[in-house]
């Protein structure tokens, strides 16, 4: 099944012919809208399955063109993120795992706008990623049990502000904690959508295509089989540093070879095989400009491990 929030953050089932309202199912369990409604679905899916299956089969659908999709998880308690978790098409060996947190207040949904802050930033990058949605609370889960805690998957963009190297600081990544990254947590820097697809509909989450277009130009195109650390490995590592609960999410990291600048006026479309695709806009009051297309300098830096991403990029 595919679950969405739409219009006045009402929960719905996404079908090929549109969206079916399921607030009548979630309401009696304590929530009829928003994050709370989605968490009710996540934690009570087994008890609700018969009603949801019936609505999925015979419920009246509203055409997708007639509704406004919201983020399927507008305020998760935790937005966990893996860092440096891809082999860059085989150019890099697996490195020690590290990660960070994004502020939950940075979440936006389909059709919303990423607002670039006026801070002195080298470049703003789009990182298209598979995002896990947790269904159970846990602390210290093992790899063997990790997938039991996954409810489903969604698509996300980890919007990233790259600072000069002398501001970022050097040294190894922290592999013993998950601090909040202020440079990835500006308001609007966490687009999520368009739906949550339950894990039973995804045969192999380690074999999904991830794509991103900017104004119709394909930039990002990689498969999750390029990940340096598997989903179960990543969950175990994260959960030994941070607890998580139903409705929390984990960004699985990105292949950096298709990164490019985000700038004023861009229309960005992201697609993860399974959850599907959605579009966001970009605005920048300062109207800063960068070269269009793939940021080949950063791509090379990441492949070669010669420097932090974006450290040599500046606005034109």
Image (cartoon, grey):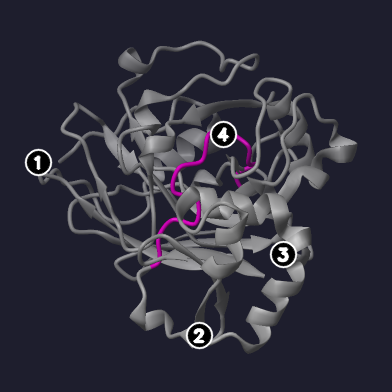
**Residue 236 appears in view:** yes
Report the residue at 58% width, 65% height from top.
3
Left or right: residue 31 versus residue 116 is right
Give coordinates of residue 167: x percent, y percent: 31, 15
Left or right: residue 212 versus residue 51 is left
Residue beneath label 2, please?
A: 61
Residue beneath label 4, please?
A: 80
Where is residue 9, by image quadrant?
A: bottom left
**Residue 223 appears in view:** no
Q: Residues within 10 Å of mark 1 (few under 14, many from 20)?
A: few
User: Mark 4 or mark 2, which is nearer to you?
Assistant: 2
User: Mark 3 or mark 2, which is nearer to you?
Assistant: 3
Q: Residues within 10 Å of mark 3 (few under 14, many from 20)?
A: some
Residue beneath label 1, please?
A: 286
Report the residue at 46% width, 23% height from top.
180
> 154 above or below 138?
below
Task: Report the disc number at residue 48.
Answer: 3
User: Mark 4 or mark 1, which is nearer to you?
Assistant: 4
Element under disc 2:
strand
Mark 4 and mark 3: Cα distance apart in space: 28 Å
Mark 2 and mark 1: Cα distance apart in space: 42 Å
């Amino acid at each position: 099944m595919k679950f969405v929030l739409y219009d006045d953050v009402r929960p719905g089932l996404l079908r090929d012919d549109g969206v079916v309202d399921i607030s009548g199912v979630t309401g009696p369990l304590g929530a009829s809208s928003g994050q709370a409604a989605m968490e009710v679905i996540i934690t009570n899916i087994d008890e609700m399955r018969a009603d949801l299956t019936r609505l999925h089969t015979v419920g009246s659908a509203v055409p997708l063109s007639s509704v406004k999709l919201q983020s399927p998880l507008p305020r998760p308690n935790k937005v966990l993120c893996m860092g440096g978790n891809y082999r860059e098409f085989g150019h890099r060996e697996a490195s020690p795992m590290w990660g960070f947190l994004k502020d939950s207040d940075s979440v936006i949904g389909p059709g919303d706008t990423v607002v670039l802050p006026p801070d002195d930033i080298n470049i703003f990058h789009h990182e298209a990623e598979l995002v896990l949605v947790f269904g159970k609370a846990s602390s210290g889960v093992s790899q063997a049990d990790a997938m039991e805690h996954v409810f489903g998957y969604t698509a996300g963009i980890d919007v990233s502000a790259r600072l000069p190297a002398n501001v970022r600081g050097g040294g190894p990544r922290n592999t013993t904690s998950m601090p909040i990254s202020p440079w990835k947590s500006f308001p609007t820097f966490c687009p999520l959508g368009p739906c949550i697809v339950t894990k039973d509909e995804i045969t192999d989450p380690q074999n999904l295509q991830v794509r991103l277009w900017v104004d119709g130009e394909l930039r990002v195109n990689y498969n999750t089989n390029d990940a340096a650390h598997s989903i179960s490995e990543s969950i175990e590592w994260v959960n030994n540093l941070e607890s998580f609960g139903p409705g929390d999410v984990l960004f699985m990291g990105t292949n950096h070879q298709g990164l490019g600048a985000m700038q004023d006026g861009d229309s960005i479309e992201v697609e993860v095989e399974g959850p599907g695709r959605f579009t966001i806009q970009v605005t920048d009051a300062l109207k800063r400009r960068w070269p269009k297309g793939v940021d080949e300098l950063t791509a090379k830096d990441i492949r070669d491990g010669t420097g932090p991403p974006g450290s040599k990029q500046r606005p034109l």
